[in-house]
Amino acid sequence: MPITKTILSDWSALVPVLPGEGPRTQALYDAIRQLIETGAVPPGAKLPPTRDLAARLHMSRLAAVAAFERLIADGFVTARVGAGTFVSDEVPLISVRLPADEPVARAAMPLPGTLGVATADERTLKIFRTLLSRHLARPSPEHFHYGDPKGGAALREAIASYLRTARGVRCQSGQVLVTTGTQQGLDLFVRSMLKPGEGAWIEDPCYPSARAAFEGNGIRLQGVPVDAEGLDPDLGITLMPDARAVYVTPSHQFPLGVAMTMRRRLALIEWARRNDAWIVEDDYDSEFRYAGPPLTAMQGLDASSRVVYLGTFSKVLLPGLRIGYAVLPDEVMAKVVALRVRTDRFPSTLAEAALTDFIREGHLAAHLRRARCHMAAARDALVAGLKGASGLTVTIPEQGLHLLAELGSSCKDTELVEVALAAGLGVRALSSMAVSQPPRQGLVIGFAGFSPEALFRAASAFRVALDQRSGS
């Protein structure tokens, strides 16, 4: 998990779950000190407020305050009046030693179930290597001078053609901006079209990185609860009537997995038209639908040009490719491109050229057919491994690359994160994705990038651990 100088939103992945009994202050002090000494939390990083940290770790605030006071006394952190608590600029660092028989390369391997892992198989990688070699062997002039800040014309045309056919998006190549992923597209939009202090709605629970993009640019966020029909615009109006934008994942809500109904989509578009507001549609994994064709994008329903459409090849191929796209109304495109020129200049022409050929020559369509079959088998293996697990209610998704396991009222998802990690299963706590409403308890588990066998083994080990925990 990258560390920035903002408050970390999910410390369940960094701070070990504290024991139910014993010296809570000492345990928290030791955990944070270890993160600082190993460099996991770098100098200058801002620690969460003691109130938030105590709530996430289910401990008293007094215990959290006592731990922070010890860290301050020992010189690991400093308190700044009115600003918060920060890691000191100079702290001793210690190296993290791996077991003697543990290869260094394996230290970074994600556990089965970890979100955001690639779908590309060996056949796809081989084809992409060939395409890259082709352009390196006979490089075109475009690689030797500064390019178009929108991205190369050939790739933008290939993306526009693909979106018109596969997603029902209404666009031409001139409306497409090539980005380094949806996060950059979202950040460029927020910085270009919204002013600090303005309000926006976001789904609750939400995609944490989207929340960071808004809050990091000074936008007031209002979480709007997601139900079986998706985000409710009428409720959003009640909670924040002056919102200037809304961020949604309507085809497959992250993290709950529901699809926004047509009546809600049309109501949201009408709200945006009537209020001169913006809809940011993040269509992050729509290619992976296992029952029928993908749902039509909301952007294709919008006749008033109020929808900003974001997509990525990170889920379709691999995150390391670092190519995404945004389909932007003309008013938005002009401002976004002006900002892009100042900050990022233009995308990688070499990666663009290989991806353009990959799409045009039919490799992307073939890859998606193979990947959907593999993802369906991986999903089913994960579900089979979790079947009957004590305290879990698993929703089997018809789309996407993750599933949700909801918990009973007596369970805390942040505690089960550590149980899962010990069993070899990578999960995220649903409660860490809450915005304004009381957090729901659940586990978000991915199944992309892992073999069905590995997922079944890890899920089965987690199920056994849960059963043992329940019986103890």
Image (cartoon, grey):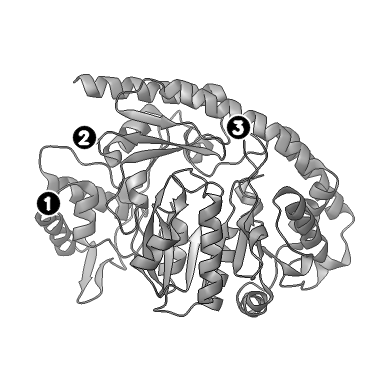
The foreground one among 7 and 366 is 366
Q: Which circle, 1 or 2, is nearer the viewer?
A: 2
Image location (x, y in percent) of residue 81:
19, 76
Residue occupying the point 71% across, 32% down:
370
Q: What amino acid is found at the position of numbered circle 2 in the picture?
A: Ser
Query: Tag 2, which secondary structure?
Result: loop
Query: In the rendered view, would you say 167 is above or below 5?
Result: above
Q: Earlier in the sequence, mark 2 or mark 3?
A: 3
The foreground one among 87 and 75 is 87
Q: Which circle, 2 or 3, is nearer the viewer?
A: 2
- Disc 1 versus disc 2: distance between alpha carbons? 19 Å
* Left-right relation of 450 to 373: left
* Left-right relation of 303 to 130: left
Query: Tag 1, which secondary structure?
Result: loop
Q: What amino acid is found at the position of numbered circle 1 in the picture?
A: Ser
**Label placed on residue 375:** 3
Image location (x, y in percent) of residue 129:
77, 44
- What residue does disc 1 label? 60
Q: Residues within 10 Å of mark 1 (few under 14, many from 20)?
A: some
Which quadrant holds residue 469?
top left
